[in-house]
Image (cartoon, rainbow, N blue to C red):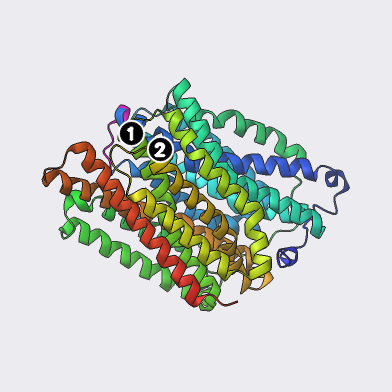
Amino acid sequence: MNDINEYSQPLGFAHNASYSKKRWQALMLICLATLMIVLDTTIVNVALPSIKRELGFNDVSLAWIINAYLLMFGGFLLLAGRLGDLYGQRNIFIGGVTLFTLASLGCGLASTQWVLITARGLQGLGGALVTATALSLIIHLFSDPIERAKAIGSYSFVCAGGGSIGVLLGGILINTYDWHSIFLVNLPLGLIVLGLTHRLLPPVENTKKGSLDVLGAITIIGALMLAVYAVMNGNHAGWRSTQTLSLLALSASSFILFLAIEVRLKEPLVPLRLFRLRNLSTANVIGILWATSMFAWFFLCALYLQQVLGFTPLEVGLAFLPANLVMAVCSLSLSPRLIIRFGITPPLVLGLILAAGGLLLLSGTPANGNFLFDILPGMLLLGFGAGMAFNPVLVAAMGDVDPSESGLASGLVNTSFMMGGALGLAIISSLASYHRDYLVDSGLAPQAALSGGYGMALLAGALLALTASLIGAVFLRK
């Protein structure tokens, strides 16, 4: 927290008396916009079975509803931050909220798979623009260290607690209306934010001059999308098929091209020298592994509860609520205290071990499982561990960089989380589908095979979380 106070000096906010008294109202506005973005990372999970039935998705292609959002979100985070530096954080914030709101309308009116997936991608782009500028706006609004700490704490609580609101709200909306409503609910929120932004958020007086690394952004997004598509269709097309191998080769070529671009540019999207920083690189690797585990939990458990145990959407939302509340509270209160007392490594390592234990418990849930005895203990353990480990990952990523590059470091670790979640979810969902088919071919009943497929994928998520814990224990510096 002490380093955060040095990251930036206010650019026009603190010196504008007319806006000084409104900064707490502006914080509420930024948090509302952030909440709208966070909601859409979890609210969709509850609606997946309903969307699957109405629009004819299969188990593998269904993951694209999540991945289209995550790929665009993660792929444009760094570029969005650069746009904010060049053209003003407030302007990019307004553009992001506008795009997200319009894309939500498109999702709510979608009647085909491709319309929904395309609109979800645009939602992800709008979410990246908002997320990349929100924290920077808060830092500029609050120059006093104590006020800034409180403001950032409120923002962090919204990020951590938004997931629990999303699953509960999703369950209520689908139980009352249908899956279209989970997207249309963003319209009034977006209009409120846009209506108040001009009154509460002042423009940033100073902006940078420079060039955009658009080609770098395009190549890295292309590389990741090709890789995810190849992995998601691996079971159907064959892992050794020409299609799969060609897509993976194109993905690798795009990534190599991205690296070549970044090395030669004076103002690259990602300065590769940053990866020489040990804690930053370690935090990004941990972020990729952990994101895969977390998205596997949300995605697979939502499907398990509805398709295996027969839960209604509302019951699924209520089922996720305890774990998300534990995660939010631990992230806000317990984790910072542990960091102050023990440093970043012990809470990170212990938190990831507990999260791995929770996933391990969930992987053994049978087809006739009981929520209180088979599901809830694993969810609570996972929520406790995830809430403990979230802040140390961010602190590790930020600790080695100069204050002038703290925003880029934050963008890198957030990109790792988003991209790791997208690519990891593709692999995990393919693994679940592959193992389910194997169990069916072995003579197991379809419902038991479905449960077994989810269990195998959750076991893989547990192993990844444990691997992330070991990497943190070995490579993180104090």
Q: Which residue is mark 2?
A: 371
Query: In the orientation shown, which residue stands out farthest toward the right?
Result: 17
Image vertical order of residue 468 relative to residue 79, above or below: below
> Measuring 37% from the left and 66% from the top, which residue is drawn there?
255
Return the x and y of residue 89 as percentages of the image width and height.
67, 52
Judge left or right: residue 318 versus residue 402: left
Type of the residue with mark 1 = Leu
Look at the image and tell me whether residue 264 can be seen. no
Magenta segment main secondary structure: loop
Chain part drawn in magenta? 54-59
Q: Is residue 306 magenta?
A: no
Q: Quadrant of the N terminus?
A: bottom right
Q: Nearer the viewer, mark 1 or mark 2?
A: 2
Say which of 265 and 442 sits in front. Answer: 442
Q: Earlier in the sequence, mark 1 or mark 2?
A: 1
Return the x and y of residue 386 as percentages of the image width and height.
52, 55
Q: Which residue is mark 1?
A: 309
Q: Label 1 vs label 2: CA separation?
A: 9 Å
Quarter-of-image position of residue 478: bottom right
Return the x and y of residue 397 as percentages of the image width and height.
57, 68
Look at the image and tell me whether residue 357 can be seen. yes
